[in-house]
């Protein structure tokens, strides 16, 4: 599941890598842009296959967008630049609260597109990625999509811990971005503390979008090593 302001196209490199191993793949879609909202299920893969280990991959807010029943039935979880609590408590979270309020106001005005492009730049940094190729930056902003973006901004503020349905007993991999400008270091620390048995992969020079690293083969190796 993609994160805030993303869409399922960001998973294209993963889909190809999974297909090369004969693994099935399904992508969740929140429907911020022109793609309709959709959510996968564990019953059947995209090619009608069943069985195998149920591995859930989520990026950032994606952990909190997955339906509880789908999350609870995962048999392994990969958390990419994710969090339980997004806004740190008390004064430590002032910057995040102010940023969310400003973004919400811009979504309701004429500068929504500009705000999204600035967000993509921060998420991609330090990689020089064209923000119009990320998420919904290349698509018109429809009223329904803007409404979902606004609702999920509020959700970011309300996320104070792991979802209740999180399967804490299953193998979990936390992938941290060392230069993440979206998820605060305090939120990264809280996630590690909430999941002390999880494996940790810290990519010190990566930004929130985890570009510029051989992430896909590293994650495939972790999945293949599951017992």
Image (cartoon, rainbow, N blue to C red):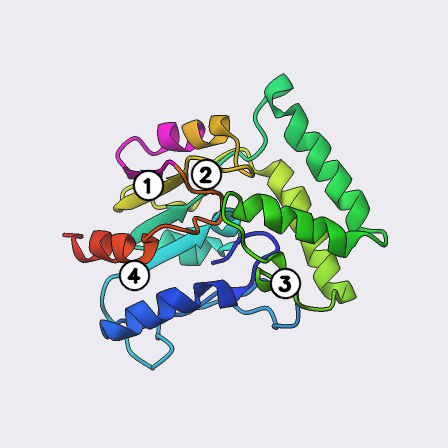
Q: Residue furthest right?
A: 110
- The span from disc 4 to disc 3 (Cα, nearest Å) is 28 Å
Sequence order check, earlier mark of 2 and 1: 2
Question: Visible in this render: residue 131?
Answer: yes
Front of the two marks 1 and 3: 3
- The span from disc 2 to disc 1 (Cα, nearest Å) is 9 Å
Sequence order check, earlier mark of 4 and 3: 4
- The local secondary structure at tag 2 comes to loop
- The span from disc 2 to disc 4 (Cα, nearest Å) is 19 Å
- The local secondary structure at tag 3 comes to loop
Q: How many neighbours does mark 1 have within 10 angstroms: few (below 14), some (14-19), or many (20 or more)? A: some
**Which residue is painted at 42% across and 46% down in the image?**
165
Part of the protein shown in magenta: 190-204
The x, y position of residue 96, in whole percent, is 64, 32
**Which residue is painted at 43% across and 68% down in the image?**
12
Q: For mark 2, what is the residue?
A: 162
Front of the two marks 2 and 3: 3
Q: Residue furthest front?
A: 128
Q: Which mark is residue 168?
A: 1
The x, y position of residue 98, in whole percent, is 72, 31
Sequence order check, earlier mark of 2 and 3: 3
Q: Residue furthest bottom?
A: 48
Q: Which mark is residue 54?
A: 4
């Amino acid at each position: 599941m993609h994160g805030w302001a993303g869409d399922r196209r960001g998973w294209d490199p993963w889909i190809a890598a999974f297909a090369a191993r004969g693994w099935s793949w399904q992508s969740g879609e929140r429907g911020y842009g022109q793609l309709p909202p959709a959510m996968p299920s564990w019953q059947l893969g995209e090619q009608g296959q069943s069985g195998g280990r149920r591995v859930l991959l989520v990026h950032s807010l994606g952990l909190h967008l997955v339906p509880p029943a789908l999350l609870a039935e995962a048999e392994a979880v990969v958390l990419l630049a994710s969090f339980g609590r997004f806004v740190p408590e008390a004064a430590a979270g002032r910057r995040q609260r102010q940023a969310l309020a400003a973004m919400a106001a811009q979504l309701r005005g004429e500068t929504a597109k500009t705000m999204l492009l600035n967000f993509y730049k921060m998420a991609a940094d330090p990689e020089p990625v064209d923000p119009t190729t990320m998420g919904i930056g290349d698509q018109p902003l429809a009223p329904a999509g803007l409404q979902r973006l606004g609702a999920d901004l509020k959700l970011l503020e309300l996320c104070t811990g792991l979802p209740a349905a999180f399967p804490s007993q299953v193998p979990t991999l936390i992938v941290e971005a060392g230069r993440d400008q979206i998820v605060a270091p305090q939120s990264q620390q809280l996630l590690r503390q909430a999941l002390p048995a999880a494996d940790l992969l810290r990519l010190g020079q990566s930004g929130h979008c985890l570009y510029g690293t051989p992430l896909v083969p590293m994650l495939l190796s972790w999945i293949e090593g599951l017992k």
